[in-house]
Amino acid sequence: CYILGIESSCDDTAAAVINNGVILSNEVATQKIHEEYGGVVPELASRAHQQNIVPVVNQALKKANIDKKQLSAIAFTRGPGLMGSLLVGTSFAKSLAYGLDIPLIDVNHMQAHILAHFIKDEGHSTPKFPFLALTISGGHTQIVKVSSYFEQEVIGQTIDDAVGEAFDKSAKILGLPYPGGPLIDTYAKEGDPKRFKFPKPRVAPLDFSFSGLKTSVLYFVEKNVLENPNFIVENMNDVCASLQFTIVSYLMDKLKNAVAHTGIKEVAIGGGVSANSGIRAALLEAENKYGWTVHIPKFEYCTDNAGMIAIVGELKYKEDMYAENNVAANARMKL
Ligand code: ATP
Ligand code: FE
């Protein structure tokens, strides 16, 4: 059966069609408008979703080579995310499901970042239950114990900023455009990770804190620029490499604590920051060093995408886990 997934929680409008675990199309319209503001402007995001949603859905159906009448269900992101953005996807999904007289399935965006691992894909291994999921994204940083598809327990999380925010805000201080995370990754590849030291905040063993990092980056930059106005330009690679090294080793420290705490060595990552080459390399190293089994999603299923919404839709469809007709978007939806 064919299931359509729709994602509109933040600034990407996405649609995908899945059939029996296989993604037939995975379309995304990224909103460029936010770059000039250095961050996502909710009102503009909502308007762009309204413009993009019909063409993106049509494109997904076309690429999958099916007609909307062949769909068995519509899955959509109910939350968490920006209310104005979620409302567009939610209203659209409800109307389409109603019009086609097929079931509507609500999906938690963070659960989808984790269950993206169950998309059938050559060369990608599927995690075995129970496993630990490190979800690292623009809005979240969590360690989740996943006992089955729908049994997910948050065992550690950030007490302030998300790791993606730490990347993006540090990048902004370095004068890089939004979103700066991928750019830090690019510069880091050419730099010396041991050149500069940044602090790793002390919190509970499985929790994270990132708000102090951006402050220390700010002081670090201000101090050095005072001595040499060209400091950033001359040292961009080393600064990015050192910053990324700090963040990655902090994430790995927490993951090691979680493995020790639960005894689970099956580890999966998810969320936009899992596209980062540093964390990917560190996890592969841990596989050999500590005997973990590591699962890293394909690039296109790391950042926001509708493929992950479609797979959760399919898993829920098989269990008849449908949404009510009056389901509402939930900006603060919990796992
Ligand atoms: P959430 O999923 O918590 O609602 P979101 O949907 O905004 O947040 P994602 O799209 O999952 O977040 O991830 C976006 C984040 O990932 C941004 O902060 C971006 O900078 C970061 N990111 C993407 N690629 C990389 C990379 N290669 N290195 C570091 N950060 C990256
Ligand atoms: Fe996301």
Image (spheres, helix red, strand yellow):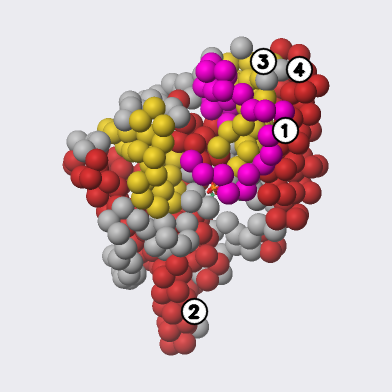
Q: Amino acid at mark 3?
A: Ser
Q: Amino acid at mark 2?
A: Asn
Task: Report if the CB atoms under discs 3 and 2 are less than 8 Å apart.
Answer: no
Cα distance, mark 3 to mark 2?
58 Å
Prevailing secondary structure class for the magenta stretch in the rendered image: loop
Kindly identify which residue carries mark 4. Answer: 101
Check the image and report above or below for 255 versus 216: above
Task: Report if the CB atoms under discs 3 and 4 are less than 8 Å apart.
Answer: no
| Label annotation for residue 326 | 1
Kindly identify which residue carries mark 2. Answer: 230
Q: Which residues are magenta?
A: 309-335
Judging depth in this view, the residue of 41 and 218 nearest the camera is: 41
Task: Report if the CB atoms under discs 1 and 3 are less than 8 Å apart.
Answer: no
Task: Report if the CB atoms under discs 4 and 2 are less than 8 Å apart.
Answer: no
Task: Report if the CB atoms under discs 4 and 1 are less than 8 Å apart.
Answer: no
Cα distance, mark 1 to mark 2?
57 Å
Q: Amino acid at mark 1?
A: Asn
Q: Secondary structure at mark 1?
A: loop
Judging depth in this view, the residue of 263 and 59 nearest the camera is: 263
The residue carrying pointer 3 sits among few (fewer than 14), some (14 to 19) or many (20 or more) residues within 10 Å by Cα, namely: some
Q: Is residue 101 visible?
A: yes
Kindly identify which residue carries mark 3. Answer: 72
Cα distance, mark 4 to mark 1?
15 Å
Q: Residue at x 35, y 64 (%)?
A: 242
Q: Is residue 190 visible?
A: no
Cα distance, mark 1 to mark 3?
19 Å
Residue 25 x %, y %: 63, 25
Q: Quadrant of the N terminus?
A: top right
Check the image and report above or below for 306 versus 11: above
